[in-house]
Each structure stands twice: as C-alpha cells, then as structure tokens.
Image: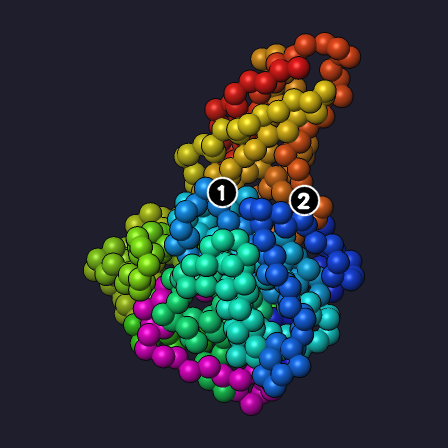
Amino acid sequence: MTRFVFASLLTLGAAALVADLGAQQPPYDTFPPADPPYFRVRYEASKAPGGLAFPVNYTVWIPPGVKVLRGVVVHQHGCGEGSCKSGLTGAYDLHWQALARKHDCALLSPAYEQPEKADCQLWCDPRNGSAAAFQKGLADLGAQSGHPELARVPWALWGHSGGGHWAGGMVLLHPDRVAAAWLRSGVPQLKADPARTGIKAHTLPDAALAVPVMCNLGTKEGVTVKGDRFSGVWPANEAFFAAVRGKGGLVGVAVDPLTSHECGNQRYLAIPWLDACLADRLPKTAGPLNPMPVGKAWLAPVLGGEAVPAAKFAGDPLKAAWLPNEAVAQEWTRYVTDTKVADTTPPPAPTNLRVEGNVLTWDAAADPESGLAKFVVERDGKELAEAPGVAKNPFGRPVFQGVQYSDTPALPLVPLRFTDATAEPGGRHTYRVVAVNTAGLRSAPSAAAGR
C-alpha cells in the first residue's frame, strides 16, 4: 500500500469526489461569510521546524445568547483537496449546530489548504503542527468572539478519513481535553508497520482509555468488500479497537451496512452518541471532565448483533463494542442493521418569519435527532410549496442544506428563503412555514406573517 492510500485510507482522491454536491473548484477562495455568530481566523503555512506545512483557516459558530461556553464540537474533514475545501462549510451545518447549542458548545470546522497530491500526514498527524495551530486558533477565535474560555474548554471531536486519524491522534496526545471522539473511516496507528512508510505510530497512554471513542466505517471498507482501495480501513480499525478495548478502553465499533468511504447516514448515530457522552462528561462549570458512569454502559458484538447491559454480556467484555447507555445501544442496533435510526420528536417550529414583497425569509433550528430535510410554505392556510424544492443527498437521507463527501453543507449555502412567484401583484396574503426533519416529522407552524 502506498503512502497515498494508507491504512486508514486518508486520501479521498479526486475521482471519489466527482459526484460531490457543491464541491468547490480551485483555488481555496470561496469562503462563506463569517459575520457574527460566525468568526474566522486563517494562518499561512509555517516556516518553522515542526510547524504546520499548509495554510489553514478555522471557522467557529457561537450559539447566540450563550454566556459561557462549556466546550467545542470540532467537525474535521478528510484528506485531499476536495475534502479540505468541504471543511469551509462545516460550522454552518444546522444539524451539528443543534448538538453544539444543546450543550452550550461552539461548533468549529478547520479547512486545511492541502494540494491534492501532497502528503496528508503533514496535517492529519497532529504532531506535525496541526495540534498547535488548532489550539492557537481556539485562543484567537476566543478573543475575537468575546469568549476567551474557548481556549480552555473540552473538545468533542468528529473526523472523517484523515480527520479520523487526526481526531484519534488528539485523543492520544491530549486525553484530558477530549470529551469524546467519533472516528469515521480513519484511525491513528498504534503499532509501527514498515510496510506503511511515512506513518509514525502513536503510543497509547492510560489516560486515553477513559475517553469515549467510536470507530465508524462503511461495510464496503474491508468488512464485506475485500481488495479495493478502501479495504484497508477495516483492518486498521480492527487493530486500533483491539488495542484500546483490550486494555479496557471505552471504544465501540459501528459498521455502516450500506456504504464505503462516504459518510452516508452516520450523523444520525454520531450526533446522539456525542450527545450522550457530552451530557455525562462536560462539567457544569470550569473544571476537569467528568468520568463516564460505569453502571450505564452496554456492550455489543463488534460486527453487529444484540446489545445488552454490560453486566449481562455473555462473551469477553474486552472484545465487545462499548456503548454509553441503553438509548444509544438501541440506536446503534438500528444503525448497524439498516442505518434507519428512529426519531419520534418533531423539529422546532421556524421563527421570525418575514415577508417583503413576495420574498419570505425565516430563522430555524434543526432537530438534534434528525436534522432538517425541508420546509413547507403555507399561504392563506393552504400548502403552497416546499423549500428548497427537492432536497438532495447522494450519500444518505436528503438534507435541506445538501451534504458533501465529508458530511458538510454544499456550497453555495442554501438560504432560508422562498419567493412566491404566484402571488398576485398587490394582493394580501398570510404565510406560515413548517419545518420537516429527515424522519418526515413536521414541526408546529411558525407564527403567521403577511403582506
């Protein structure tokens, strides 16, 4: 296996991104606006030994009205030029914002400016300058946003491919700062392998065993499909899991039964899993992370099956996937079966509906469990249209904002806006807007607004 396609298959490659919705074209210059509650910093490549070899920008979203941040959720893209560009929109994802808002956390998305064929290890190994740049970014963004605590709060890490390698590396380097980490299709290497040149193995400190970690990959990444460019992902995950779980680490495995390297529907398990971990680990005020409760854990067979309370698991618990509680265990069981994680809660109703001429705009928050699929516009008490029309997602459930390969909104960002092209000139109408989540559940209607 070459350095370009190594154990955790860090490089997506240009061919894999051909169908990527909204994928940007070179150069890295299409930035969504970063007006409050968004903030951005950008650093040029370092010329210092051990510094970050590529330019990088960090965009953060601060929940409006939050007084003191309790943590930061980090959404880390994978390797390759297309995936790096997709990181530019990660902080704008309404679904991930819902998770961050629930726990008074910021949502941060890095975007490394890695040329397509450059060595991804130069950023996805955090020891190569990206850990230091990340922490500098938190401090600078904290000062810019008026939240200096951003430099000190715990981290909840999500990473895809090379981003998984980075997030897992940060767990091993900074276990005292990481509340939980979700590793999609990429893990750090714990044992030196001379066949994989250019990849430096990490050590596994005892403190990292207390950090909840989920190894998530597609079944076509070496579980059921062998011999293709992604078939090395499962052996790498299997080795990482065995090493960590074998020492009692809080690590699970969730195999997506439908996908290969694309992210698919993983967010419908990743967000509830991170939600559960944050609920247990984040301190109410500044201080060290709380340990995960011992008595709530469930265990399950690594490649799918029945999850049971840890005390009732019949096999070797150090070879079983660890799950934080019963609710997540039930969601895990559904996810590894068909990814159709259930949801019984409707999304919040849209707010602040405005009508200017025949243009409607509104505000909306996503359903933490299922995100947002679309909005239904009502005129004079009758359904008029859906916005944005037909939601698209080639990788999983249709999502209002669209989804790129690294699980980020498509560019240009889809606005919360609808134009009523059939309204009679000078006519008087009353409008309402209803949100629909990706499970098909509808919110209550917004307050009415007229023209």
Q: Residues within 10 Å of mark 2 (few under 14, many from 20)?
A: some
Question: Residue at the spot x=41%, y=61% of the render?
Answer: 153
Q: Is residue 278 above or below residue 57?
A: above
**Which residue corresponds to mark 1?**
64
| Dominant secondary-structure state across the stretch colored magenta | loop
Q: Is residue 117 among what the camera can see?
A: yes
Residue 396 on image: x %, y %: 59, 47
First in sequence: mark 2 or mark 1?
A: 1
**Identity, as a three-letter code, of the amino acid under mark 1:** Pro
Q: Residue furthest bottom?
A: 194
Residue 349 on image: x %, y %: 49, 28
**Residue interval drawn in magenta:** 193-217
Q: Is residue 254 among what the camera can see?
A: no
Question: Residue at the spot x=39%, y=79% of the render?
Answer: 204
Q: Which secondary structure lies at badge 1?
A: loop
Q: Residue furthest top?
A: 427
Do tag 2 and tag 1 residues touch (Cβ < 8 Å)? no
Q: Left or right of 304: which side holds 3?
A: right
Per the rendering, the mark at residue 413 is 2
Question: Residue at the spot x=63%, y=42% of the render?
Answer: 401
Q: Left or right of 202: which side holds 247?
A: left
Q: Is residue 13 above or below residue 451?
A: below
Q: Is residue 347 above or below residue 378?
A: below
Q: Is residue 214 magenta?
A: yes
Question: Residue at the spot x=45%, y=42% of the render?
Answer: 65
Residues 308 and 33: in front is 33
